[in-house]
Every structure is written in structure tokens, then in C-alpha cells.
Image (tube, rainbow, N blue to C red):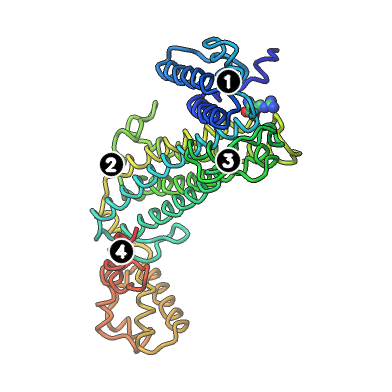
């Protein structure tokens, strides 16, 4: 059993190196400005911190210690001696770690939002390029009504737009500068917290020092947002998997996103889309992990909280990969529009249109619904489609039918009619594309 290894977090919080150093430089500048340490000491410290960062980024040094904060301080001491010890005046690792996490997350949220934007653009592009492709829309995965493929795909675009808004809203609560809370009670030194906030680009400072070091809500909120995003990704992935099956044949994945089988030579498996779903489980797990770790923790800082980092970083890294892969996957899809159109022949997907037709002839919708159900049952029994029915057969079900019913039996027209705001008509889909 290795006790040191058990309490250590350096293996993963090394990810925070840049933020820890930038935070320390801002802190030390503030200490000098407030005359808590001398200008010359501050310059010595900040210069050495910058060179540590440079060496770290060029992979010239390995930072060693219990965690990244102690590792950087001991590297600093190696370089400039005793004066390094002045850096930690009016500060604790408790507020320092929150600062690092907040700086890191602010950057990552903007990167993720950029990737979501990219995915939305890809979805818009494929929708634009296939604007007139018609497919059966589903409820319960059963053919239901004709719809534009572009309308269907844009549904995912709107989900992703909400995801982006959610992240940017979360950003506001991440964008709070914690330094100055020190261990948890604040400090006796007359520090200038707003000066630190300004240097580091924070728009506010935290209000209660106890809350400041105890709070991981911003991570939990972010992980919840990640869970919703990955849930959306998993839905797109599953839809594409279903569509790529032999039974559907609506789409084909580009070769780079499929793999063969070790035993069945003919196979082209959608492994990447499947893994997008699989990783979603991990992302939910990360949320649950931090939520559970925080449950019942008394104020203020507790070492339990060190365990927030691995799930936090894991969700960031996985989500970024998932978004990149999905964008590329969708951009490379081969759309089989003929197959989509011919799939409309199954499942009597114009039944609603026929009922609406009867409504336009004066029947109450419920009565019309019943009549069309009878027609569908008749067609199933006699192995016919709506298009196969003669005028005489239509009239048997209702005298309201006349020759004009043939106009209703057209998928394109059915789509064109659905002009209600947000509906599947060409015009409304074009409007959506502009708005998204
Ligand atoms: N590595 C610690 C963490 O991630 C830093 C804070 C340590 N504070 C303490 N009082 N031991 O939470």
C-alpha cells in the first residue's frame, strides 16, 4: 500500500498547470500592488513562474509533489529559493484549486461551444443539400407521416442550440473569482480581489468565503449539461445506426466510421456511432460520481472534493471527441433518398391527410378518423395501398370522397400542406435554416 499515492492528485491535476501558474502570477502581482510583498520579490517570483510554465509546455520538466499546487511551489523554490514562500501569502490551496478549476472550465466551455456550433453547421449543410428529400417520419419507430429529411435533421440542430445556450448560461456561474477566500474564512491582509479578477478575466468575485471553497455546483452543473449533450448525441447516433441497417437502408456511413467483423466478411458495422452511445454512459456516470461525492459534505473544504477532478476532466475530453467525431460522421453520410422515398409506401402514412381531407369536406375529425381507420383495415385485408383503390371503393366508405382525393395521395403535397409555423413544409424548413 502506497500512502503517498493514495492522497496524491498530481497524476491528473497536472492538467491544471497553466491555470495554476497564471493564477499565481495574478495573485503575486496583487500582493505587490497592495504592498504585502515587495515589487522585486514579485518580479522574481512571476519571472520564475513564467519560465516554469514555458519549461512545462516544452516538456522540459516533470512537476512532482502531492498535487499540482505543491508541485509548482516546490519547483519555484528550487529555482529562486526562500522567496518562493512569499507567493502563498493570503492564499490557501482551498481557494487556489477552485480558481484553477474555474479558469480551466471557462476555456473548455468555449471550446465545447465551438464544437457544438460546428456540429450545427454540419447538420444545416446536410439539410440544405438534401432540402427536398422526403422520408417517412416516425412515432414509436413506426411509419407515421411524410416529412422532409431536412426537417427531421434540423430537430437535432435545435437540441444542440439549447445545449449551447445551457453551457453559456453555466459559464456565467463559472465566471466567478474565488481567490481571497483563503482556507475558508478570508484573510487579514488587505488584498484586492477585484484586481486579481480583472487580471484573470473574471467578471465577478465570490461573495462568501466559506461557500467559495465548499462549492462545486459549477462542476456539477457543467457535468449535467454534458450529460444532456451526450444524451442528444446518443439519440442521433442510434437513429443513424437504425437508418444504416439493411432493413432501412436510408444512409451509409463513410468507411472510416465502420469496421468489419472478425468472422463475417460481409459486415460493415457502425462501431463509431455505437461508441458514441457507449460513452454517454460514462458521462452520466461522471455526473453521478461528483454528485454523490458532494452529498452530505459538511462545510467547508473537505478532502473528498479532490475526487471531483477525474470525472470532470473525463467528461470534458470525451465530450470534445464525441462532438468532433459526430460532426465528421454526419458530414460523410451517404443519403439514399430513393430508399427514403420508397419507404413512404409502407404504413399508410397519408392516413392523416385523408382524414384531414374529409374534415375539409365538413366531417368532424373523430368521424373522419374512424372512416380512414376502416379504409386502412380494408386495404390490409385486400392487400392494397390507398393508391390502388377505385373511386367506387372510396365512395363505399364515405360519399364525401370524389376525384379530388387523388391529389391528396401525394407525399410532396402532403408535406407542402404542413405550413403551420415550425412544420415540415419547404418554406417553413427554409425559415428554420435561416433562424438556426
Ligand atoms: N489537491 C487538493 C484538491 O484537489 C487541493 C486542496 C488541498 N487542500 C487541503 N486542505 N488539503 O482538493
Crowding around mark 1 (Cα neighbors within 10 Å: few <14, some 14 to 19, many 20+) is many
- Judging by the rendered image, the residue that carries numbered circle 1 is 10
Q: Position of residue 47 (x, y in %)?
A: 46, 19
Q: Quadrant of the C terminus?
A: bottom left
| Mark before the other along the chain sequence, 2 or 1 | 1
On residue 429, which mark appears? 4
| Mark before the other along the chain sequence, 3 or 4 | 3
Q: CA distance from mark 1 to mark 4?
A: 51 Å
| Mark before the other along the chain sequence, 1 or 4 | 1
Label 2 vs label 1, nearer the camera:
1
On residue 332, which mark appears? 2
Tell me which residue sits at (60%, 12%) in the image. 82
Q: Is residue 244 visible?
A: yes
Q: CA distance from mark 2 to mark 1?
A: 40 Å
> Considering depth in this image, is 359 or 423 the residue closer to the camera?
423
| Mark before the other along the chain sequence, 2 or 3 | 3
- Judging by the rendered image, the residue that carries numbered circle 3 is 219
Tell me which residue sits at (57%, 13%) in the image. 77
Q: CA distance from mark 2 to mark 3?
A: 34 Å
Q: CA distance from mark 3 to mark 4?
A: 37 Å
Q: Position of residue 418 (x, y in %)?
A: 33, 72
Amino acid at each position: 500500500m502506497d500512502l503517498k499515492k493514495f492522497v496524491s492528485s498530481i497524476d491528473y491535476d497536472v492538467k491544471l498547470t497553466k491555470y495554476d501558474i497564471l493564477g499565481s502570477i495574478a495573485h503575486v502581482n496583487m500582493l505587490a500592488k497592495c504592498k504585502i510583498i515587495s515589487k522585486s520579490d514579485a518580479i522574481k517570483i512571476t519571472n520564475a513562474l513564467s519560465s516554469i510554465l514555458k519549461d512545462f509546455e516544452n516538456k522540459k520538466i516533470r512537476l512532482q509533489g502531492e498535487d499540482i499546487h505543491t508541485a509548482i511551489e516546490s519547483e519555484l523554490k528550487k529555482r529562486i529559493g526562500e522567496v518562493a514562500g512569499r507567493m502563498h501569502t493570503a492564499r490557501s490551496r482551498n481557494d487556489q484549486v477552485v480558481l484553477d478549476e474555474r479558469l480551466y472550465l471557462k476555456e473548455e466551455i468555449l471550446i465545447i461551444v465551438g464544437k457544438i456550433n460546428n456540429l450545427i453547421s454540419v447538420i444545416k449543410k446536410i439539410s440544405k443539400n438534401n432540402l427536398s428529400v422526403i422520408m417517412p417520419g416516425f412515432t414509436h419507430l413506426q411509419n407515421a407521416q411524410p416529412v422532409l429529411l431536412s426537417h427531421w435533421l434540423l430537430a437535432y440542430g435545435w437540441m444542440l442550440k439549447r445545449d449551447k445556450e445551457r453551457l453559456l448560461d453555466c459559464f456565467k456561474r463559472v465566471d466567478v473569482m474565488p481567490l481571497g477566500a483563503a482556507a475558508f474564512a478570508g484573510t487579514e491582509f488587505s488584498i484586492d480581489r477585484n484586481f486579481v479578477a480583472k487580471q484573470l478575466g473574471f467578471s465577478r468575485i465570490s461573495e462568501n468565503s466559506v461557500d467559495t471553497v465548499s462549492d462545486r455546483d459549477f462542476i456539477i452543473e457543467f457535468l449535467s449539461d454534458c450529460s444532456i449533450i451526450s444524451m442528444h448525441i446518443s439519440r442521433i447516433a442510434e437513429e443513424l445506426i437504425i437508418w444504416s441497417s439493411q432493413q432501412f437502408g436510408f444512409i451509409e456511413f463513410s468507411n472510416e466510421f465502420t469496421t468489419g467483423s472478425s468472422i463475417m466478411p460481409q459486415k460493415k458495422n457502425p462501431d463509431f456511432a455505437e461508441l458514441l452511445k457507449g460513452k454517454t454512459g460514462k458521462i452520466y456516470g461522471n455526473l453521478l460520481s461528483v454528485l454523490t461525492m458532494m452529498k452530505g459534505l459538511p462545510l467547508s473544504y473537505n478532502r473528498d472534493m479532490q475526487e471531483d477532478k477525474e470525472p470532470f476532466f473525463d467528461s470534458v475530453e470525451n465530450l470534445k471527441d464525441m462532438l468532433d467525431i459526430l460532426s465528421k460522421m454526419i458530414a460523410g453520410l451517404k443519403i439514399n433518398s430513393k430508399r427514403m422515398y420508397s419507404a413512404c409506401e409502407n404504413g399508410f402514412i397519408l392516413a392523416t391527410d385523408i382524414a384531414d381531407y374529409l374534415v375539409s369536406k365538413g366531417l368532424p375529425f373523430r368521424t373522419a378518423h374512424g372512416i380512414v381507420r376502416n379504409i386502412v383495415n380494408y386495404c390490409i385485408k385486400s392487400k392494397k395501398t390507398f393508391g390502388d383503390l377505385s373511386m367506387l371503393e372510396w365512395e363505399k366508405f364515405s360519399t364525401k370522397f370524389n376525384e379530388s382525393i387523388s391529389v391528396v395521395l401525394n407525399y410532396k403535397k402532403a408535406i407542402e400542406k404542413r405550413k403551420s409555423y415550425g412544420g415540415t413544409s419547404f418554406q417553413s424548413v427554409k425559415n428554420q435554416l435561416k433562424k438556426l
